[in-house]
Image (tube, rainbow, N blue to C red):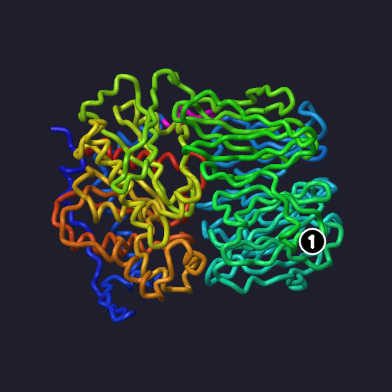
Amino acid sequence: MKQSLMTTAGLQAPVAAQKPYAMTLHGDTRIDNYYWLNEAENPDVIAYLEAENAYLDAVMQPTQALQEELYQEMKGRMKEKDESVPYKDGHYYYYSRYEEGGEYPIYCRKKDHLAAEEEILLDGNAMAQGFDYFQVGGFEISDNEQIMAFSVDTVSRRNYTLRFKNLTTGMLYPDEIPNTEGGSYAWAADNTSIFYLQRDQQTLLASKVYRHVLGTPVSDDVLIYTEEDPQFYMGLGRMKSKKYIVSVSDHNGVSSEYRLLDATNPTGNFEVFYPRQHGLQYYIEHFQDKFFIRTNVHDAYNFQLMQVNEGRTQDLNHWEVCIPHRDDTYMEGIDVFQQHLVVTERSEGLLHIRIINQQNQQEHYINFGEPAYDASVGHNPDFATNILRFTYTSLTTPVSVFDYDMNTQTKTLRKEQEVLGVFDKNDYETARFFVTARDGAKVPVSIVYRKGFQQDGSQPLLQYAYGSYGYSIDPYFSAARLSLLNRGFAFAIAHIRGGQEMGRTWYENGKMLQKKNTFYDFIDVSQYLIAEKWTSADKLFASGGSAGGLLMGAVANMQPDLYKGILAAVPFVDVVTTMLDETIPLTTGEWEEWGNPKEEVYYHYMKSYSPYDNVVAQDYPNMLITTGFHDSQVQYWEPAKWVAKLRTSKTDNNLLLFHCDMATGHGGSSGRFKRFREIAREYAFMLDLV
């Protein structure tokens, strides 16, 4: 008989010690038997995590051949020697490329034309040697194009060390600035002054803006601004027009505030664009002598586009409407060119790219030609061009990069992700439909499967969703997913509330005291998929990560009988305890998403769905739960405690497997191919169970 996971499930699972810890608030006492697992330096904690990893390896051992087969398939579809489409910035074309067998990108540029000699800026493979984890956090080139500021994280805690490289000599400057926010850097026009964000090491929030002068001691760096409100996230950069350096403080979904500095005056003062106001959000782009503003001012909940002249930004009476608010269309973003304005919009759950000629005000939309897809405006640093770079993908179309002539309305395919081996997009089919949720909301669903899939309830299906922070999950292609589709699975994305697929209200109705709509939507879609015989309860799997892992924990408690198995990656499951602990990274900035449990109404509502608090004695599906020890977003102890509690509470003999990667954080493995090992494990888990 074939050995499977279930035939080895009799192995002894680890059992964490119970050490009751009482927490009382609002007259309610919660007992946490596994609170001690947050002691990262405790040898007993490390021993428990390692025991869980060993148990997973032992239970999964019969699938090793399948995992290797899946890994080789996924890796075999990827073109190892590959190169991104170059983009022009200043006098140079910038791109990255991979060498055969290389895990990390090599960053390069060529001057004036693509036939020029290649300059290697950073070699990720060489830089990553000796590290279990390696990530370049972005780079910025000085105005004279001779100095590169770049950052590196080698722990996976998202603390990036800022370094500098002379691109003429190839030498690194001795300047080294630790604990910065990756990608949030801005050169001044003098080519020696650079601004950066420093992260608080307790909360891991970027809260301070500093100015560093190249060649001077880091200890002499000047503190420019401190964000005193821990509910605000910070960003920093140089505007596309290059005129301004901008610092932005954003209170998640509630308010925003920009500060601007003339890039030619690095020792000057940052000036507030418009002071923060609760409920007022705005996002700006500079153009000539004015600013375009994407904002929800005047109750424009789906956002509208306004403009204002320089020097008059702090008076709302001077803000003029360019594109008014629409009830059925959410304005997601803008990009400004010398002659054109590009507006990204969302309606009926799909993205649309709108082109407006700023000279004659004529406009049009790009035609994508498919009913379900994902499209986004790419990196377009060249202000004067008529060419728009955008990317396009669908559930059956590999990621494609296009250059679009905004004058002639013609698009040129610059690159389509090459899928090696046997792949024909016509072998797969997609469908898009709406499911009526229990309160009447229409939830979009996108689904893909290989031709020949039988809609008779006999075939397995993986249902995925996220549903938080207004983050929309659009239909996207995955070459790795082909390994699942080719083995009879269908893959469905439930575009549930908490995302922003259907506009701003779709998000508002899936957060705070409406958060349970997110879980109900997912469950209602599952029930629909079973009723319409896309699959059956003994072949339906659910998957989600981070806040989507919270979703997995909630549906596992609420409707465990619907699922054969659940995959939860870096899951946010101990909601009440985390939202009460302001010393934990990111807590305070999340109150406008989940609520502040120090207020009684939020405490009780949050407790009513928090996965960890609602584990009970009942049957649960087979579960595979993963995390990273260095996770800065969801601390490793949340899933660890959840697993420990599930082990002592659940009444079934189904699998409960937990893996804590001791070398990674929230994003998992950093290498190009290493991530396929993680996916292969997940797929083997599901395939063996069906």
- The amino acid type found where label 1 is placed reads Leu
Secondary structure beneath dot 1 equals strand
Looking at this view, is 469 or 78 the one in front?
Answer: 469
Does 605 sit left or right of 166 as displayed? left
Q: Is residue 663 magenta?
A: no
The residue drawn where x is 30% and y is 60% is 611
Q: Is residue 543 above or below residue 634?
A: above
Q: Quadrant of the C terminus?
A: top left
Does 554 sit left or right of 326 as displayed? left
**Residue 553, how many percent across, how many down?**
30, 55
Q: Quadrant of the N terminus?
A: top left
**Residue 35, how many percent across, how many down?**
32, 72
Q: What stretch is highlighted in magenta?
A: 74-80
In this rendering, does residue 666 appear at all?
yes
Q: How crowded is mark 1: few (under 14 residues within 10 Å), some or many (20 or more)?
A: many
Residue 511 picture quarter: bottom left
Looking at this view, is 214 or 123 the one in front?
Answer: 214
Please tell me how many numbered marks the rendered image carries: 1
Residue 535 picture quarter: top left
Does 653 sit left or right of 16 as displayed? left
In this rendering, does residue 664 appear at all?
no
**Residue 170, how many percent across, how many down?**
78, 47
Residue 681 picture quarter: top left
The residue drawn where x is 59% and y is 33% is 391
**Residue 584, how many percent across, how many down?**
47, 70
Q: In this view, does 619 lie above or below 101?
A: below
The residue drawn where x is 42% and y is 54% is 509
Looking at this view, is 50 or 502 the one in front?
Answer: 502
Residue position for label 1: 261
Q: Is residue 243 above or below residue 689?
A: below
